[in-house]
């Protein structure tokens, strides 16, 4: 089988060398290391970063809001329920008007509140309301750092995509020596640059992407529904990979047991009709046109014709109720329909119970034509393949010109390879040198 281009062979995106123009929301929580955060504000501003400080009550025991504001050149926010601040700059705007949130120092208490999803002050509320990448720089006594609770909280935060820098080892303010020192300021700045590296200078910067993921569920009555075995792992991985390459990405997800991917705006839906509505709104109603649309969701093809408002009761004489079904909208076909707002690249998945690559390619080509999409990634979801819900996937990709038979790899690797192939197709580069928008203008 032809494997004409191999975008997976391209080198990874180079980290961004400069943070010039980046907006950082800096949360300073309680700890003696808070004094270093004043230095962090200065050094961030030296490299062109606009810093918006937020001080917790604990942080305010160590430094003043006035000091942070003076160095940042802007007001330092402290209170959640301050009417003036909510009128001028609500916590939702604080959460959105930044490219990155840094929590430095992150005390044990701050990490615990973040892990628990609390929203009991301005800092935690902003964190909960934000979909921006988060970098934490823990600082605490070494026994507190090693405590099982702190380590569990750390693991929880990392599993949600929060980046962690430090802590380092050395003399601690409490007089002990060990691990718990907040990372030095240049190390925090380097970690921030690395975290933003892919997104800020990635080959898809300036482009918008839509990804669907997960199953849809179709109500039979208030307690029962029809669903399928999709875990959402592949779609979520694709959304994260596109965002890492710089695309402004919106994920429309059915019910899954996964965390929302970092750096991605996630819209949660249940039914196929809700998914179709959300996607159509993004295609036709969004301020910016969509450039990329990837449909990884396992949308239910049919729904019960009428969802009973009350729980269906068993007939006393026995026998099962007849369940009349009607067809759901085809979300992919709606977005792929010809028109001014059709995304430049529309990509579908094809779930087939077919192992043979040639047969898979034939089915994928048929689906590609029928749904008016540009590429189709076919995979075998037969029982025993563990594609649905599993960590790995095996893809046969058709794009109208070539057929690529990808080896079995993790869903994350599939997502990365797909994202690089998309970048190559739209911008001529999988690593991002030219402006994606300019490249796109040249090809459309
Ligand atoms: N899809 C969609 N909306 C639907 C059905 C499918 O957006 N109502 C999308 C899927 O996300 C996938 C592609 O269409 O990208 C193909 O889905 P698949 O289930 O393989 O194909 P079907 O169209 O359902 O065709 P069939 O079940 O007959 O193979």
Image (spheres, grey):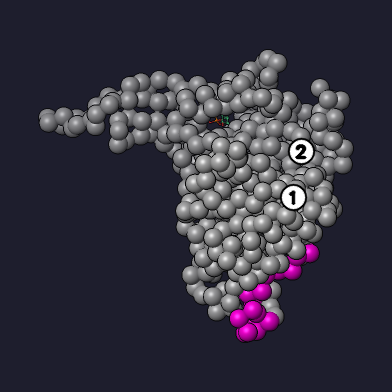
Say few, some or many: other residues with alpha carbon within 10 Å of mark 2 (under 14 / 14 to 19 / 20 or more). many
**Which residue is the extreme one toward the left?**
317
Q: Which residues are magenta?
A: 171-186
Asked if residue 177 is among those painted magenta in the image, a careful observer would answer: yes
Residue 33 appears at what percent x and percent y?
A: 66, 69
Q: Residue at x 60, y 44 (%)?
A: 95
Residue 201 appears at what percent x and percent y?
A: 80, 44
**Which residue is the extreme one toward the top?**
339
Q: Is residue 56 left or right of residue 246?
A: left
Kind of element beneath mark 1: loop
- Asked whether 35 or 253 is in front, the reply is 35
Closer to the camera: disc 2 or disc 1?
Answer: 1
Tag 2 residue: 204
Q: Residue at x 81, y 22 (%)?
A: 444
**Real-space Cα distance between discs 2 and 1?**
32 Å
- Asked whether 325 or 253 is in front, the reply is 253
**The N terminus sits in image quarter:** top right
Tag 1 residue: 73
Label placed on residue 136: none
- Asked whether 201 or 398 is in front, the reply is 201
Residue 27 appears at what percent x and percent y?
A: 62, 56
- Asked whether 310 or 95 is in front, the reply is 95
Earlier in the chain: of badge 2 and badge 1, it is: 1
């Amino acid at each position: 089988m032809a494997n004409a281009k191999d975008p997976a062979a391209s080198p990874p995106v180079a980290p961004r060398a400069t943070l010039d123009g980046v907006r950082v929301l800096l949360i300073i929580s309680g700890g003696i290391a808070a004094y270093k955060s004043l230095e962090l504000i200065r050094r961030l501003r030296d490299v062109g970063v606009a810093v918006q400080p937020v001080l917790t009550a604990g942080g305010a025991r160590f430094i003043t809001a006035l000091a942070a504001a003076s160095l940042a050149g802007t007001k330092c926010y402290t209170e959640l329920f301050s009417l003036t601040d909510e009128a001028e700059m609500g916590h939702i705007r604080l959460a959105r008007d930044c490219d990155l949130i840094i929590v430095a120092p992150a005390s044990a208490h701050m990490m615990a509140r973040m892990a628990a999803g609390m929203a009991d002050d301005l800092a935690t509320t902003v964190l909960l309301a934000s979909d921006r990448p988060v970098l934490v720089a823990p600082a605490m006594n070494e026994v507190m750092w090693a405590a099982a609770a702190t380590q569990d909280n750390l693991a929880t935060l990392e599993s949600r995509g929060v980046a962690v820098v430090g802590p380092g080892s050395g003399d601690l303010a409490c007089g002990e020596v060990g691990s718990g020192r907040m990372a030095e300021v240049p190390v925090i700045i380097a970690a921030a640059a690395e975290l933003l590296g892919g997104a800020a200078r990635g080959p898809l910067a300036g482009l918008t992407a839509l990804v669907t993921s997960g199953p849809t569920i179709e109500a039979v009555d208030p307690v029962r529904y029809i669903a399928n075995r999709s875990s959402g792992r592949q779609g979520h991985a694709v959304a994260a990979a596109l965002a890492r390459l710089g695309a402004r990405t919106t994920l429309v997800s059915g019910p899954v047991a996964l965390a929302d991917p970092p750096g991605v705006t996630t819209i949660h839906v249940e039914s196929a009709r809700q998914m179709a509505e959300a996607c159509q709104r993004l295609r036709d109603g969004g301020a910016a046109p969509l450039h990329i649309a990837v449909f990884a969701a396992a949308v239910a093809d049919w729904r019960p014709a009428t969802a009973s408002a009350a729980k269906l009761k068993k007939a006393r004489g026995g026998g099962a109720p007849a369940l009349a079904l009607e067809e759901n909208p085809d979300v992919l076909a709606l977005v792929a329909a010809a028109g001014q707002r059709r995304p430049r690249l529309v990509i579908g998945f094809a779930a087939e119970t077919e192992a043979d690559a040639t047969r898979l390619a034939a089915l994928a080509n048929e689906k590609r034509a029928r749904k008016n999409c540009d590429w189709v990634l076919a995979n075998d979801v037969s029982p025993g393949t563990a594609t649905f819900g599993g960590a790995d996937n095996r893809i046969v990709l058709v794009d109208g010109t070539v057929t690529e038979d990808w080896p079995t790899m993790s869903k994350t690797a599939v997502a990365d390879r797909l994202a690089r192939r998309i970048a190559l197709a739209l911008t001529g580069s999988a690593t991002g040198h030219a402006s994606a928008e300019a490249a796109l203008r040249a090809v459309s």
